[in-house]
Amino acid sequence: METLLEQIDRAHLPQHVAIIMDGNGRWAKERGEDRLFGHFHGVQSVRDIVEASAEIGIRYLTLYAFSTENWDRPQAEVAGLMELLVNTVRREVDQLKKNGIRLHVIGDFSMLPPSARQELSEALDLTAENDQLHLILALSYSGRWDLTQAFQQLAQKVQTGAVRADSIDADTISDHLSTRDFPDPELMIRTSGEHRISNFLLYQLAYAELYFTETLWPDFRRQHLFEALLDYQQRERRFGKTSEQLTT
């Protein structure tokens, strides 16, 4: 019997997979622990999915790690998350460099505490020459924030005459988003059974296939990723066309 990995057609993988890592709090609550316990165990899932993505040949992996709305969570949880972020990046950066994985960060970098900004900046520099997998962390990120900052940039350029208002099109907007250097995701995965995109890559997910799983993030492993990839490969991506048009 073929394994899940053997069933995947590597010639038709999504180039870019985005994941909303949801369910850490519920996972911890089920075990009588606080939410940070769930976030701590979610790090192993991150490690496994990053390694599996690099091994199978996915080029871009975006993880929704911390939204702009998450700043409104209890102060103790936010502080714990920032400490976990710093410690995890510090611990994992050598392995990322060794495995050819380049780290990127999208979001409002200025909102992060100085220790997190310093650790992330060092990791970005250390992995800058890698090209096997681009790991994109969405930190202090939201789709509305991304669109707002893009429109602010464009408004300033229109005001100075650098851009004509009537020349702005979809490509112009894409070129001013924080994801301008990456292709749009073809597959978006959300764990924990919730069926919404929660202000994540609102513009970029326009034509992404959406995959929802009941699995909580700390339990999500490579076999769950492979299941999502197999589901993706069974779908027909028409981009507004008919099935008949695609076959001809």
Image: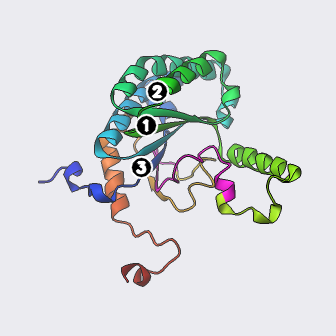
Q: Give me the residue at 88% from left, 51% from top.
A: 159
Residue 106 in sight from this viewpoint = yes
Amino acid residing under circle 3:
Thr
Query: Alpha-carbon distance for marks 2 and 3?
Result: 18 Å
Marks 2/1 in contact by CB < 8 Å: the verdict is yes
The image shows residue 12, relative to residue 39, as above or below, that is: below
Side (left or right) of 125 relative to 235 = right
Residue numbers of the magenta segment: 172-194
The residue to which callout 3 is attached is 213
Residue 33 in sight from this viewpoint = no
Q: Secondary structure at mark 2?
A: helix
Looking at the image, is mark 2 or mark 1 earlier in the sequence? Answer: 2
Queried whether the magenta region covers residue 169, the answer comes back as no
Q: Secondary structure at mark 1?
A: helix
Side (left or right) of 32 relative to 162 = left
Q: Quadrant of residue 50?
A: top left
Q: Residues within 10 Å of mark 2 (few under 14, many from 20)?
A: many
| Disc assigned to residue 217 | 1
The residue to which callout 2 is attached is 38
Nearest the camera: 63 or 212?
A: 63
Query: Alpha-carbon distance for marks 2 and 1?
Result: 9 Å
Q: Magenta segment, principal secondary structure?
A: loop
